[in-house]
């Protein structure tokens, strides 16, 4: 009975994923209502909150890209919040503050290392704008990004709007090529059905816009987030999106609001990042299960299924892979997964080259390595995430010796 | 806990507002949380170490079997093993076929002998028949012309007699007249008429003899149906001999082929009796076999030691020796990688019957020195 249930869950997960990708293609080209109504005349005041930790010069480039936004300068500001970086990030913030005087930039620093979520909340304290945009300090933003995000708030029930995250370094390595394909397909296909119902389950923290009043409503919950007393500083984007939905607002990703991120180019960094994400997914899954009736009552069925089945699929996937490896250790090395990966890789590479030339991949065959990564991901990430729920660091940006609280003895 | 220092932009001099304090958990709850966290961490560390140990063990096993080639996989063949039963069925059918062929061969041999005997008899008859024909022809050649002359003479005699017989009617009439006139008595008349009838009968016999003589002359001077019958019989005799030759030839060939088939089947049965499946099906004792991949052929020698190990690789003990090697190719699934591999079977002499249930055993030497 148990194996049947496991397979059923796995098949359901795969089915939902495949259906969502296929629906994504259909909706993208056939249903105008998939796209939110945008009013470019609507120009609310905007605060761009930029929490930062050990980003170095990148933070300067990020602020520079924001300063070039096609949005009335007097209507937006940047609030950069350093979380006690061990490197010269804060100096770069100050330099950006001095150099880009065309916009209002505020810089701040936490007294102790507090994590991304609390840094956002701290920065929020200094904002008075109608729309809050939280960004990652390692991204480069398209000049129209802010305009595209705010235009979507023309829909009165729109609570949070995200942007499309592109990859700046698609050809650094096989790992970045794989991530480019995954990012592209996720934003351009997988999330389209969620867009259709205005119920995106996770808006990327790289570019996350939210109504100020809504964020203020959620902020105490963000600050209160803890795991048996240990503050939860990760996955604030997923948490914010989830909370937005539960409060009856819509969530949406505007793929015309572009930002570019540098994805991990080594396996260890990728692993850390994916582990952090998986931890957020698991944590979110537990939250969903705890409040399932509320979810069923308030959310779109597609959203509930995604919130429940995707993390459940990760757990079941682990069991299935373990079973498969013990019964037939070389099953994953067969030609079918490889051919499937190569086929998907080839098609998406062609699509990316045609529609997003900046992310064009030099070696489409690199996606074949996804077979290996999917095995690692299924086998290690979920159990590791389940066993490290007490982790509260910045993930990929953590430098071991700086994990202890840092005082405000920097400039 | 957290404080913030905001550096205002050059155009700003706004004071920072302190952030709200994070709510501290009550002491009781804090203790409860600490306990949960401690237990969780112990659990998580245990699980992670177990996972790590599992991964390392898995990697080690995979690596070990990727490199090691001295293993063999014990095979337990039950009496009801499908292949053994199938083998046994085929063996019984083969033996039955041999018996049938033997009976058939015996029949064929008898038939051939009979046909050869009959042929000999026919061949002996033919010269006698030829000699009789020659003899008869020679006789006819000498008696034929003589008979022809006698026939002509007989015909002339009969012609003369016929003229005399024409006068007998008149003699009979005068006898009747004389009787009527009372010149002679009835007795005399009867005697005279009887003499006339005798003469007529003699004439008739003479005619018959003439005709028979003519026939006889015809027989002796021309080829008659009797001669043809004899010749036909001679031809039949020859044809029968020829048919017998063909039949004997076919029967001999068939006999040869069946004898060869018997030999082949006997050979096959001899080979089959060396098969593990036959041994398994026919033996009363439990026999132990093992599949050996071709990679391990060098270690598969009769008398070679067999080691059985814990965890399929360590803490090995000598479990027995190789008793017999079966050269026929077998295919099996790799016990670890689950791929199809080729090899052969060996029979094992096991001191410890439990070793037959191990996933793998090792031939020749211990795989990791202990």
Image: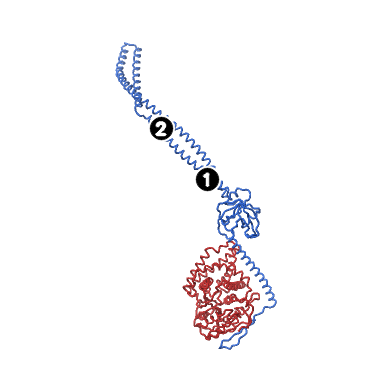
Chain colours: A red, B blue
One can see residue A160 in this view:
no
Total number of numbered labels? 2
Q: Mark 2 lies on which chain?
A: B
Give the farthest residue toward the top. B183
| Of A251 and B349, the residue lying toward us | B349
**CB under 8 Å between discs 2 and 1:** no
Neighbours of disc 1 within 10 Å: few (<14), some (14-19), many (20+): few
Give the number of the mark in front: 2 or 1: 1
Query: Image quadrant for the C terminus of chain B?
Result: bottom right
Residue located at (35% from left, 29% from top): B223
Element type where label 1 sits in the image: helix
Residue B32 at what x, y percent from top left? 69, 74
**Pointer 1 residue:** B264
Residue located at (67% from left, 78% from top): B25
Neighbours of disc 2 within 10 Å: few (<14), some (14-19), many (20+): some
Question: What number is the disc on residue B131?
Answer: none
On the same chain, marks 2 and 1? The answer is yes
Where B68 falls versus A359 (above or below)? above
Compared across the picture, whether B203 is left or right of A236 comes to: left
Residue B364 at what x, y percent from top left? 62, 55
Residue B4 at what x, y percent from top left? 61, 83
**Pointer 2 residue:** B234
Looking at the image, is mark 2 or mark 1 earlier in the sequence? 2
Residue A281 at what x, y percent from top left? 59, 72
Element type where label 2 sits in the image: helix
Query: Image quadrant for the N terminus of chain B?
Result: bottom right
Q: Mark 1 lies on which chain?
A: B
One can see residue B273 in this view:
yes
| Of B314 and B220, the residue lying toward us | B314
Where A258 falls versus B339 (above or below)? below
Measure the alpha-carbon separation of dots 2 and 1: 45 Å
Compared across the picture, whether B125 is left or right of A326 comes to: left
């Amino acid at each position: 009975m148990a194996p049947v249930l496991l397979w059923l869950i796995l098949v359901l997960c795969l089915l939902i994923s495949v259906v969502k990708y296929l629906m994504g293609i259909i909706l993208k080209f056939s249903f105008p209502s998939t796209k939110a109504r945008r009013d470019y005349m609507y120009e609310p005041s905007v605060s761009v909150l930029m929490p930062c930790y050990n980003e170095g010069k990148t933070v300067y480039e990020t602020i520079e890209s924001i300063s070039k936004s096609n949005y009335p300068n007097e209507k937006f500001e940047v609030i950069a919040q350093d979380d006690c970086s061990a490197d010269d990030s804060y100096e770069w913030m100050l330099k950006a503050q001095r150099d880009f005087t065309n916009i209002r930039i505020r810089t701040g620093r936490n007294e102790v290392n507090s994590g991304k979520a609390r840094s956002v909340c701290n920065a929020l304290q200094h904002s008075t704008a109608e729309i809050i945009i939280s960004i990652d300090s390692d991204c480069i933003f398209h000049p129209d990004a802010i305009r595209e995000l705010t235009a979507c708030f023309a829909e009165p029930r729109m609570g949070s709007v995200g942007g499309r995250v592109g990859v700046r370094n698609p050809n650094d390595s096989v790992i970045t090529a794989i991530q480019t394909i995954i990012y592209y397909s996720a934003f351009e296909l997988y999330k389209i059905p969620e867009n259709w119902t205005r119920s995106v389950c996770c808006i990327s923290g790289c570019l996350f816009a939210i109504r100020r009043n809504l964020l203020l409503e959620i902020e105490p919950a963000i600050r209160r987030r803890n795991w048996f007393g240990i503050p939860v500083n990760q996955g604030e984007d997923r948490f914010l999106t989830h909370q937005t939905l539960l409060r009856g607002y819509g969530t949406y990703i505007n793929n015309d609001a572009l930002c570019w991120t540098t994805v991990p180019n080594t396996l260890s960094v990728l692993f850390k990042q994916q582990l952090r994400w998986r931890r957020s997914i698991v944590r979110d899954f537990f939250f969903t299960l705890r409040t399932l009736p509320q979810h069923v009552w308030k959310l779109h069925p597609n959203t509930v299924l995604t919130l429940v089945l995707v993390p459940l699929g990760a757990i079941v996937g682990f069991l299935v892979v373990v079973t498969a490896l013990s019964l037939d250790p070389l099953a994953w090395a067969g030609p079918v997964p490889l051919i499937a990966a190569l086929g998907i890789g080839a098609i998406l590479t062609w699509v990316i080259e045609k529609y997003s030339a900046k992310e064009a991949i030099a070696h489409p065959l690199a996606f074949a390595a996804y077979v290996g990564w999917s095995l690692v991901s299924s086998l290690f990430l979920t159990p590791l995430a389940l066993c490290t729920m007490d982790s509260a660091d910045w993930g990929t940006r953590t430098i071991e010796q700086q994990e202890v609280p840092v005082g405000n003895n920097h400039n | 806990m957290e404080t913030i220092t905001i550096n205002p932009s050059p155009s700003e001099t706004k004071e920072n507002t302190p952030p709200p304090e994070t709510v501290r958990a009550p002491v009781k709850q804090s203790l409860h949380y600490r306990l949960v966290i401690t237990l969780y961490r112990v659990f998580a560390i245990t699980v992670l170490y177990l996972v790590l140990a599992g991964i390392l063990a898995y990697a080690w096993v995979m690596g070990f079997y990727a490199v090691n080639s001295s293993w063999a996989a014990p095979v337990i063949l039950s009496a009801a093993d499908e292949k053994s039963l199938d083998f046994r069925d085929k063996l019984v059918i083969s033996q039955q076929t041999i018996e049938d062929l033997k009976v058939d061969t015996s029949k064929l041999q008898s038939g051939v002998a009979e046909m050869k005997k009959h042929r000999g008899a026919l061949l002996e008859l033919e010269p006698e028949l030829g000699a009789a024909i020659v003899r008869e022809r020679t006789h006819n050649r000498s008696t034929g012309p003589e008979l022809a002359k006698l026939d002509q003479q007989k015909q002339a005699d009969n012609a003369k007699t016929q003229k005399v017989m024409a006068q007998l009617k008149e003699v009979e009439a005068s006898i009747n007249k004389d009787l009527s006139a009372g010149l002679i008595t009835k007795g005399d008349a009867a005697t005279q008429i009887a003499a006339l009838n005798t003469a007529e009968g003699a004439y008739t016999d003479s005619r018959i003899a003439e005709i028979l003589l003519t026939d006889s002359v015809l027989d002796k001077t021309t080829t008659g149906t009797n001669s043809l019958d004899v010749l036909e019989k001679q031809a039949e005799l020859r044809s029968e001999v020829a048919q017998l030759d063909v039949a004997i030839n076919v029967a001999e060939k068939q006999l040869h082929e069946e004898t060869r088939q018997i030999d082949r089947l006997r050979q096959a049965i001899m080979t089959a009796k060396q098969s593990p499946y036959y041994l398994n099906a026919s033996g009363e004792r439990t026999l132990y076999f093992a599949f050996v991949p071709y990679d391990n052929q060098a270690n598969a020698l009769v008398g070679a030691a067999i080691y059985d190990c814990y965890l399929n690789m360590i803490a090995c003990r000598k479990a027995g020796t190789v008793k017999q090697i079966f050269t026929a190719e077998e295919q099996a699934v790799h016990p670890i990688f689950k791929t199809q591999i080729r090899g052969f079977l060996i029979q094992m002499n096991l001191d410890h019957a439990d070793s037959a249930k191990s996933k793998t055993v090792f031939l020749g030497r211990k795989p990791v020195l202990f």
